[in-house]
Image (spheres, rainbow, N blue to C red):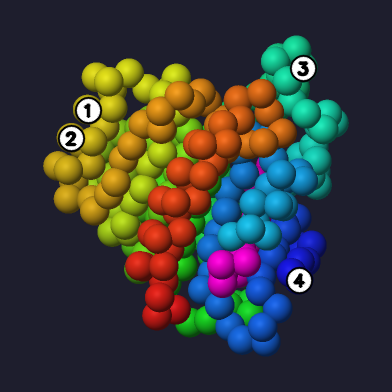
């Protein structure tokens, strides 16, 4: 599985990034993958390689490149509950500084870079994201309705921008919520807002999961949750990017 470490020109500098893609000598549909708050690390590279193995060029940018290349903070191989508070104390200022305006400026650059890669075919792309990266994915899809055909967000705070974001979506959407992240009432209200905006979507609470369930290097990991994530993500991409 070919991989690359790349630098993406942006309005504010250069973002380091990781890419994985099939070794078949042909062009593939592009997928922009936003990492969770812990950033690019072995588990994200493995997830990118897994997705690339299904026939996609997967680009994973370092969202917090303005503060330096990934990894921005020293991460243990396993992010357990005992180290999580100290790690987040370092990460939260970076997350707070990454405003919606910055997300959208960067999204322009990331999509331009992705679609110009020689291994990426013409046609629409997809965006996926985890935790805060899921929110970045939704913002990217809403800002680029002519380019983004599918967006998926997992254990992500996708409702914080309200119905205005949903009204700008044309992509097919899948939302995979952690059971510990959303109340039944909030889940119902979110789905009603998506329906009212006319968004084609699936939105599910993954049973027995807590925030961060896709990440195998954390104590939030759920093997069944990760499998369900692939079972939802891959058909979504297959349906929407088949002609790319």
**197 left or right of 178?**
left
Is 213 magenta? The answer is no
Q: Which one is closest to the eye, mark 2 or mark 4?
A: 4
Marks 2 and 3: in contact by CB < 8 Å? no
| Residue identified by numbered label 4 | 2
| Residue identified by numbered label 2 | 192
Residue 120 position, x and y percent, is: 58, 78
Marks 1 and 4: in contact by CB < 8 Å? no
Q: Quadrant of residue 49?
A: bottom right
Marks 3 and 4: in contact by CB < 8 Å? no
State the residue in front, 207 or 138. Answer: 207
- Name which of mark 1 and mark 3 comes first in the sequence: 3
Q: Quadrant of residue 55?
A: bottom right
**72 left or right of 101?**
right
What is the number of callouts on the image?
4
| Residue identified by numbered label 1 | 189
- The residues colored magenta run 52-64
C-alpha separation, residue under disc 2 versus residue under disc 1: 5 Å
Quarter holding the C terminus is bottom left
Disc 2 crowd rating (10 Å Cα; few below 14, some 14-19, many 20+) is few
| Residue identified by numbered label 3 | 83
């Amino acid at each position: 599985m070919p991989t690359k470490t790349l630098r993406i020109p942006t309005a504010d500098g250069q973002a380091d990034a990781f890419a994985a893609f099939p070794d078949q000598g042909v062009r593939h549909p592009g997928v922009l993958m936003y990492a969770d708050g812990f950033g690019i690390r072995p588990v994200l590279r493995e997830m990118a390689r897994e997705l690339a193995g299904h026939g996609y060029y997967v680009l994973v940018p370092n969202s917090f490149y303005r503060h330096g290349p990934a990894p921005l903070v020293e991460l243990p191989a396993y992010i357990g509950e005992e180290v999580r508070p100290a790690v987040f104390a370092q990460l939260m200022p970076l997350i707070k500084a990454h405003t919606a305006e910055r997300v959208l400026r960067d999204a322009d650059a990331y999509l331009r870079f992705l679609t110009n890669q020689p291994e990426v075919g013409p046609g629409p792309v997809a965006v996926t994201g985890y935790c805060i990266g899921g929110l970045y994915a939704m913002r990217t899809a809403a800002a680029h309705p002519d380019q983004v055909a599918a967006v998926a967000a997992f254990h992500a705070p996708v409702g914080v921008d309200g119905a205005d974001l949903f009204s700008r979506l044309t992509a097919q959407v899948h939302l995979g919520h952690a059971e510990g992240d959303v109340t039944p009432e909030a889940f119902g209200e979110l789905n009603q807002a998506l329906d009212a905006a006319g968004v084609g979507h699936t939105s599910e609470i993954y049973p027995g999961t807590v925030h961060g369930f896709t990440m195998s290097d954390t104590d939030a990991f759920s093997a069944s949750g990760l499998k369900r994530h692939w079972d939802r993500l891959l058909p979504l991409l297959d349906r929407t990017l088949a002609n790319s």
